[in-house]
Each structure stands twice: as C-alpha cells, then as structure tokens.
Image (cartoon, rainbow, N blue to C red):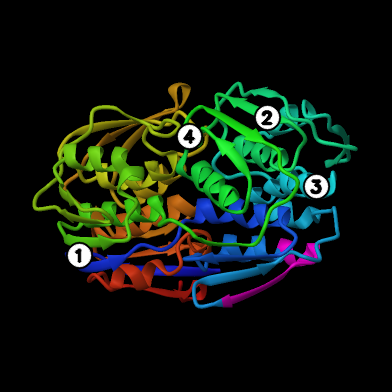
Amino acid sequence: MSSIKITGGSELKGEVRIQGSKNAALPIIAATVLNQGITILRNCPKILDVFHMIKVLEELGSVAKWEGNTLILDTTSVSSTKVSEDSVQKMRSSILFLGALLGRNREVSIAYPGGCSIGKRPIDYHLNSIKRMNVNLLEDNGIIHCHTDKILGTDIFLQYPSVGATQNVILTAVLAEGVTRIYNAAREPEVVELCNFLVEAGARICGKGTSFIEIEGVKSLHDTDFKLSPDRIVAGTYMAAVAVTKGDVVLHDVPIQQIESIIRILDKIGCSIRTGDDYLRIRSYKRLLPYENLRTRPYPGFPTDMQSQLMSVLSLADGKSTIEEKIFESRFQNVDELKKMGAKIVVEESENKAVIFGVERLEGAVVKAHDLRGGAALVIAGLGAVGTTIVKEATSIERGYEDICRDLNSIGANTRYCSENIL
C-alpha cells in the first residue's frame, strides 16, 4: 500500500491535460472480445482498472501490448468461456465480460461480483434482462452459468437506468438474431462511447445518448482503430482542486458537454469558468459560497463519482450546504476522514444526506482513502488545508488516475507518493 503526502497552501496555476476515460475504457475493453481480430484503442489511460481488464483478456486467450497510451488488443484466439472468480471479485467491471463472452461464444461462466465499498450494486437488472434474450441461466455456489443455442433480440424494460445493465445488454445483443430494444436505458457518456466503438466496428445501434436504444444484430464485427474520449471525472476532480486552492488553471482535452452539471455547480458557488471546444479555464479568487441542496442523479444529473470531491470543496464554503446521495447508499465514508481535518459535517442516515457547515480552514491530518473517488477527494482536502495531510491506502486512487501527484504538481501542488511505513 502507498500513501500520498500533501503539503497544503499552494495556489494551483498553469495548464494540465486530461487523460482518457476510465469508465469508457473498461466496457470497450470487454467489447473487444466480440471481434475476432485486432482492436487499437488510443488515448487509453494507464490505470489499475485497465490493467486488470487486460489481465482478464489475457486469461481468456488475448494478446495485449502498449505503444505509449495506445493499447493494441488481439482477440483472435479467445477460446475460454470462463472468467476466473478472482478476477470478478477484484473488480466489478469484470462483470461486463458476461455479455461480451455470451455474445461471442453463446456461453459464459462468471462469478458474482465482489463487495463494493460504496454500495451493494446488485446485478439483478443484468441477469433478468439477459434471460429474456433466449439465454438459459443457472446459478451454482456464486457462479453464473449462461448458455444458449442462439441469442434472440427482444424488448428490454429496465426498472432503473443502470449503466452496467445497459452495457451488458448491448454487448449481448450486438451479435444476436433480430432486434433488441432497451427502454429506460442509461444515458451516461460511457454508454454512448461503447455504442460509438461498436458502431465503428460494424454494429448497428440507434438511440445512443437517449433512454431508448435499439440494436439490430449483425453477423460479425471487424477490426477497429478507436480513440477514447477524455475522462469527465478526472476533469471534475482537478476543477475541484483549483476551487479549494484559489487557483487559475487551464484544463486541456476536456469533454465540455459531459461536465455541464459540474460546471453549473462550481459556477454557482463562486468559481469563474470559461470554456472552449475542448478546453476549460477555471479561476477561484475568494472563499466559495455554500450550495443549498446538491443531489446526485443519473446522467445528465450531477454524477455520484463527483460527490466526494464536492464535499471537500463545500467543507470550506462560507455557510451551510447539503448533499443528498441518490445513487449509492454508502458513499459518505469520507465524512469521518474530513472531520479529522476539522470539517463540520452531520450525516442524516435515514435520508442518506450530509449537512456540511463550512469552516474557514482545514488542518492537515492522517486520513484513509476508502475508495477511488473518496481518496481523490481527500487529496483535494489536503490541498486546501493548512499543514501536511497524509492519505493512507492511496493505491485505490490509482484505479482511476494515471498519476494524480504528477498532474497536480504540474500546476503547482506539493504532493508525493510515499510508503505507508513512514507513519
């Protein structure tokens, strides 16, 4: 395990470029299984979650190599229909191989995903939908066995616009017979990105970005050279870091349309934000204003993956703010860590709501990263604090950020990775 040491007090200034999207890369890596050939993914982030998905592909018989930030995958020889239990227990996104392998081989065996630190996230929506596509499903000691002689397109009505369920249905349907229609589909950019990739590879998909997606099955896909979009959550994280440090930073390669809800919130609490086609300048001159009631919602609402970062920002705002977490039930684990730094936050568990009473300053402390976004949020809090903050168990941050210390230091922060045993 590694820690991150942050010396607060620096105003962030300069320019930084945003990496490729984690949440787009993971389903697309799974989707490469549907093509018996070569896929080139450009602007692919070198993060732990991507490395894990590559490991699963290699266990299935694929060959992977890197050329800079370009990932080249050869899935010609994928023959296995089993995803190891260890792989799925380590990372929930491995469940996307359910639809991909089923689409390719008409058969798959995969374990239930492991526990998640931010919520239960059951896969009932995935399984109930796939069963409707002429797929037989058997559960045995935590292992899901699916098989069929042919996948048949059908109408799928999702009770909730689950991103993972939408993606798994799409992956299952691409090589199916007939037409699959998804009602109440997730609209997140990562779903759109998966559709864009599959269409470039020869799939027939209409309605991407809307709550109704139609997939007409095709016989096969072909080799593809695809560039991943920038990471909207990394962009939002660095915007939050600028907000707490009274900084002035230009972010390059920013998916502007995907972060409109983040821009709107930061603008309302006092940041000055100017956007171009793919860049953004954010400035913060004074103590920020509180936000009366911030609610996380499915896209295009405010993303749950930015909730922890905004909590760090609002901890230093001039007044009372509230955050309602509407997606996951266990995403307020940062509250106790922020309290160690002097934050004043009360959690109303019955409503899954946090009430934040902004303080004039946070104090550096030793805190713990409970999850990916929570860890990044504690780094932000450390940047805005007086003194030194050490974020323990920071390896989780590497699941989604190529090098958060490198990026923040390039715009004036004072951070570094260090060993846990320094404590």
Q: Secondary structure at mark 3?
A: strand
Q: Residue at x 19, y 58 (%)?
A: 245
Using the rendered view, name the quadrant where residue 54 is placed.
bottom right
Q: Are marks 4 and 3 in contact (CB under 8 Å)?
A: no
Between the C-alphas of marks 1 and 4, the distance is 33 Å
- For marks 2 and 3, the one nearer the N-term is 3
Residue for badge 1? 12
Label 2 crowd (10 A; few <14 / some 14-19 / many >=20): many
Identity of the amino acid at label 3? Ile
Label 4 crowd (10 A; few <14 / some 14-19 / many >=20): many
Q: Give how far across and how far down residue 21 sits, in percent.
A: 46, 56
Residue 371 appears anywhere in the view = no
Identity of the amino acid at label 4? Arg
Q: Give how far across and how far down residue 356 sits, in percent.
A: 28, 35
Residues rendered magenta in the picture: 56-66
Residue for badge 3? 110
- For marks 4 and 2, the one nearer the N-term is 2
Between marks 2 and 3 in the image, the one whose residue lies nearer the viewer: 2
Task: Examine the rendered structure and indicate whether residue 112 appears above or below residue 240.
Answer: above
- For marks 1 and 2, the one nearer the N-term is 1
The dot on residue 336 is: none
Image-based side of 3 in relation to 76, left or right: left
Identity of the amino acid at label 1? Leu
Q: Secondary structure at mark 1?
A: loop
- For marks 1 and 4, the one nearer the N-term is 1
Residue for badge 2? 180
Between the C-alphas of marks 1 and 2, the distance is 49 Å
Between the C-alphas of marks 3 and 1, the distance is 45 Å
Using the rendered view, name the quadrant where residue 379 is placed.
bottom left
Residue for badge 4? 187
